[in-house]
Image: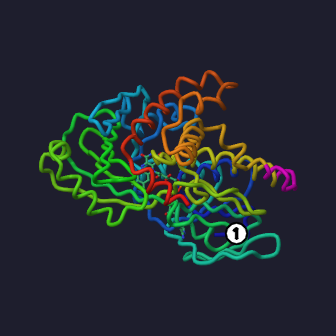
Amino acid sequence: MRERYDVVVVGAGPSGAVCAEMLAARGASVLVVDKKRPGWHKPCGGGIPESMFRPWQIPLSLGFEAASVRVVDVRQRLLRAPLRYRTVYRNRFDEYLAEKAVRAGAEVVYDAMLLDVQRDGAGFAVRTSQGACEARYLVGADGCMSTVRRKLFPEQLPESSCALAIEHWYRVPHGITTLDFYVEPEILGTGYAYVFPKDREILVIGVAGLGMDKPRTVLERLLELPRYRQLTRGAPVEATHGARIPYRHLSRLRDGRLLLLGDAAGLNTPIVFAGLPIALLSGRLAGEALGEAIASGSDAPLERYSLATLRPMSPGFEVCHAFYDHLLTDGRVPSFARIARSFLTRPHKLPRVLLIHRSLARLVDGLDLARMAALAR
Ligand SMILES: Cc1cc2nc3c(=O)[nH]c(=O)nc-3n(C[C@H](O)[C@H](O)[C@H](O)COP(=O)(O)OP(=O)(O)OC[C@H]3O[C@@H](n4cnc5c(N)ncnc54)[C@H](O)[C@@H]3O)c2cc1C
C-alpha cells in the first residue's frame, strides 16, 4: 500500500473490480481494498444474462448454462421465458474480475477491512486493517451495508427498503438447466423462492423477500413442501448463505468526489433482485467518468455518473423499477403499454421488455402488495 492514490475503491465485488480496471487502464493509480479472503463466496444465486459475458470479456466457461427462466405462479401455472442465463460461483467470478483489474495496473489488497474514512481537504483519509493512505477520489463499492455510505454519504438506505435473501446449497445430481422461480405467497408474502443450478452437481434453493422475519425458518418451512423435497431427495445441506439486497436506490450516486456503486448505492432490481448487471454497469460508468476527470484535471466529467445516464443502459433495471413504481401507486400490475412507453425510441429492446413484463406480472400475482407498499413508505 502506498501513501497516496488517485482513487481508493472499497470493495472488490463486481462493481468495484470493474471500476478499478477502467481506472487503471486509463493510467490512474488505484487501490482496491476488500475485507474478504480469496475463496470467500458472496451470498448470491449468481444468475447473469448470458448476453453480458462476451461484451464484458468474461469467459462463458465461468458460468453454467441455463437456457431459460421459468416462473411457477401462484396458480401453479408454468411460464417459460426464453431468457438465456448463466450461473456463476461468486468467488471465481469476483476474483476473475479483480484479476483483470490487477492486470490493468490496479493494486488489490484482500483481508483489508475499511476501519475508518474521513474527508481530508479535497480528498479522503482512509484507514484499513492493512494500513492507511490518502486518496483524491473515493469509491464505495462495499455492498448493501456499505461502511463508506454510512460514514460519509448524506443519504442512506432505510432498512425497510432492503430485502433479505437466504439460500441452501445441496450436492445432488439434479438435471435442472433453467432458472426457476416459485411464487409462494402463503409462506413468503412479499417474495419468491428460487431454484438455481450452479453446475450439474450443486443446486441452490433460496428465498428472497421484503420484511421477512427469521428468513432461515421461512426457508425451512418452504423446504418441507413436497415440490422442494423432491428436488433435494434427502441430500444434506452443504452450505447456507444469506444477505441483504437493496430494493430501492438512493436519489443520487455521487457526493462531490465520493461515488457509490452497485448495492452500496441501492442499485438493484426490485421484485427479482438481479443486481449483478447494474453493478457491472455502474462500475464501468463510474470508472470511465473518474478516469476522464483525473486525465483532464476537472471534476466536470463526474456529472455523467448519474441515474439518468445509468438507467437506459440496463432495460432490466429500468423495467423492474417502472413496474414496481406503477404497482405501488396503482395497486395492480401495470399494462405492457405503460411499461413499454419509454422504449418506443428503442424498439429493438421491446421483445426483451415484453418477456420481463410477463415474468414480473406472474411473479407478483398473489403477493402481499399492501405489505410491499407499506414497507416502501
Ligand atoms: C442470496 C442472494 C442471491 C442473489 N442472487 C442474485 C442473482 O442470481 N443474480 C443477480 O444479478 N444478483 C443476485 N443477487 C444480488 C447480487 O449479489 C448483488 O447485487 C451484487 O453482488 C452487487 O455487487 P456489488 O459489487 O455492488 O457488491 P458486493 O458484491 O456485495 O461486493 C461488496 C464487496 O465489498 C466488500 N466489503 C464490504 N464491506 C467492507 C469493508 N468494511 N471493508 C472492506 N471491504 C468491504 C465485501 O467483502 C464484498 O466483496 C443476490 C443477492 C443475494 C443476497
The verdict on residue 90 being magenta is no
Q: Residue at x 40, y 54 (%)?
A: 209
The verdict on residue 302 being magenta is yes
- Give the main secondary structure, helix, strand or loop, of the magenta stretch: helix
Image-based side of 80 in relation to 163, left or right: left
Numbered disc 1: secondary structure:
loop
Residue behind mark 1:
154
Q: Quadrant of the C terminus?
A: bottom right
What kind of residue is marked 1? Pro
Q: Position of residue 104 (x, y in %)?
A: 64, 48
Q: Position of residue 50 (x, y in %)?
A: 47, 32
Q: Position of residue 84 (x, y in %)?
A: 43, 29
Q: How is the image coloured?
A: rainbow
Viewer can see residue 277: no
Q: Quadrant of residue 316?
A: top right
Which residue is at the front of the view, 244 or 284?
A: 244
Which residue is at the front of the view, 57 or 216?
A: 216
User: Where are the magenta residues, as a range?
Assistant: 295-303
Q: How many marks?
A: 1
Which residue is at the front of the view, 59 or 138?
A: 138
Image-based side of 302 in relation to 2, left or right: right
Image-based side of 170 in relation to 264, left or right: left
